[in-house]
Image (cartoon, grey):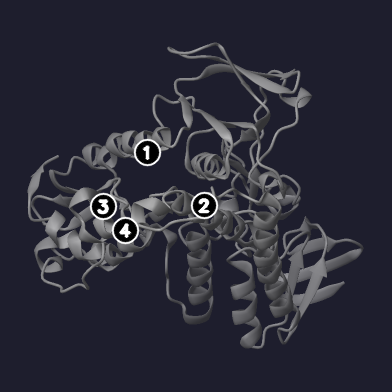
Amino acid sequence: MTTFDAAIVGTGQAGPSLAARLSALGMKVAVIERHKFGGTCVNDGCTPTKAMVASAYAIHVARRAADYGVVLAGAPRADMKRIKARKDAIVRSSSESVESWMRGLPNAQVYRGQARFTGRNALQVNDELITAERIFLDVGGRPRIPNWSGIASVPYLTNVSMMQLDHVPEHLIVIGGSYVGLEFAQMMRRFGSRVTVIEMSSRLVPREDEDVSLCIQEFLCAEGIGVRLNAECLSVQSETGGLSVGLKCSEGPIREYGTELLLAVGRVPNTDDLGLDAAGIKLDDHGYIQVDQFLRTTNPSVWALGDCNGKGAFTHTAYNDYEIVADNLTAHAARRYTDRIPVYALYTDPPLGRIGMSEAEIRRSGITALVGRRPMTRVARAVEKGETQGFLKIHVAQDSKRILGAALLGTGADEAVQSLIDAVYSKVPYTEFQHHVRIHPTVSELLPTVLEHLAPL
């Protein structure tokens, strides 16, 4: 048995930084990783997908070269082997960097293997028993595999196995018309695939406002991506040269045929093989670890951070979990995850930048709100780049004048949304926000202008 001050299980976005901070304070720390250092973001999520999105954007712009007065010798095409090699090199560098960082920490010991609780403060890793005064779980999640008829009889892809493709699918069927599914759909369409997106809801990205969903569908369809909505009774079966998906929609055929299938229907937490019962740690109905507002589990010696606690599912929220826990432990800061405001992006092209409340959430809250809107065709930066799809939309409270939320859909929106963060957190009246001078030409400079013409929501 080896005793530590702290044991950190998993090396996603929260675990490594927490290990570094605690070891720097002189604590004896165990770092446990069963597979790849860096977690989902580095290995199967943000890093590889955004590298491939960059390749897809490059080929898209190359095809539009004539629009910019540029002459190319021939039609651009995707070399998937080179695209994959570039992506793999970026991922490998990032993952190896995290592992090297962990192995070089003072007062820390790295274990490779599956960790399972054998008691409230005890973990079994391979043949070793580890005890720690405090244990931190950063074990992430994995793709959800639905229990549809025939799903086990056909090969399918997830966001993880998609990273290993070294060819362009002839016809990719994507089941799931939300964040992961749409990024891959547009990417593969630009690489040369025929793509069909199947979504069970009545619109794409149903979590977003309806005008956002419709605009995204419009520009994806303009690129040649097929969309099937209201899909019910899903089943899968093998076909000569590929597969088919059976579905019941209000429009279109009852079967969709393709050569490859991507499942993008959500994720589940990696909490089913940790022996949590032995530690007195409870899960919710979806398998996420129950935590209080300080991210402490039902075992007061154990904290859950990142995707496994169901409180964010983003790289930046996982990192914020680390900041909350570390500050509370080392500075008695009493920080809470419930204090953070939702902010995230969807990396289609153009991207969606989102912060705060949606229109549906505002209506449910009973707040009387106003909305300002401006099309990207009236944003100089977008016109100059030749990328005028989308719009900027900001909601404000009528009485307090504070900014409630925004949906920015257009070129640079994933960066422009950042300029609203401080205003939303500090509850600055939008009239004061309008007084701050911004750089021209940018997308962000138009945000005060969006607020000049407000209308009732």
Q: Amino acid at mark 3?
A: Gly
**x and y, in percent, of residue 365 in the image:** 23, 41
Callout 2: 10 Å neighbours few (<14), some, many (20+)?
many
| Sequence-first disc among 1 and 3 | 1
**x and y, in percent, of residue 84 in the image:** 68, 55
Q: Which residue is mark 2?
A: 59
Q: Looking at the image, which residue sits at the far right?
A: 127
Q: Nearer the viewer, mark 1 or mark 3?
A: 1
Disc 4/disc 2 C-alpha distance (Å): 16 Å
Q: Which residue is mark 3?
A: 405
**x and y, in percent, of residue 424 in the image:** 25, 61
Q: Nearer the viewer, mark 4 or mark 1?
A: 4
Q: Quadrant of residue 28?
A: bottom right
Callout 3: 10 Å neighbours few (<14), some, many (20+)?
many
Q: Secondary structure at mark 1?
A: helix
Front-most of 130 and 301?
130
| Sequence-first disc among 3 and 2 | 2
Q: Which residue is mark 1?
A: 219
Q: Which residue is mark 4?
A: 385
Q: Amino acid at mark 2?
A: Ile
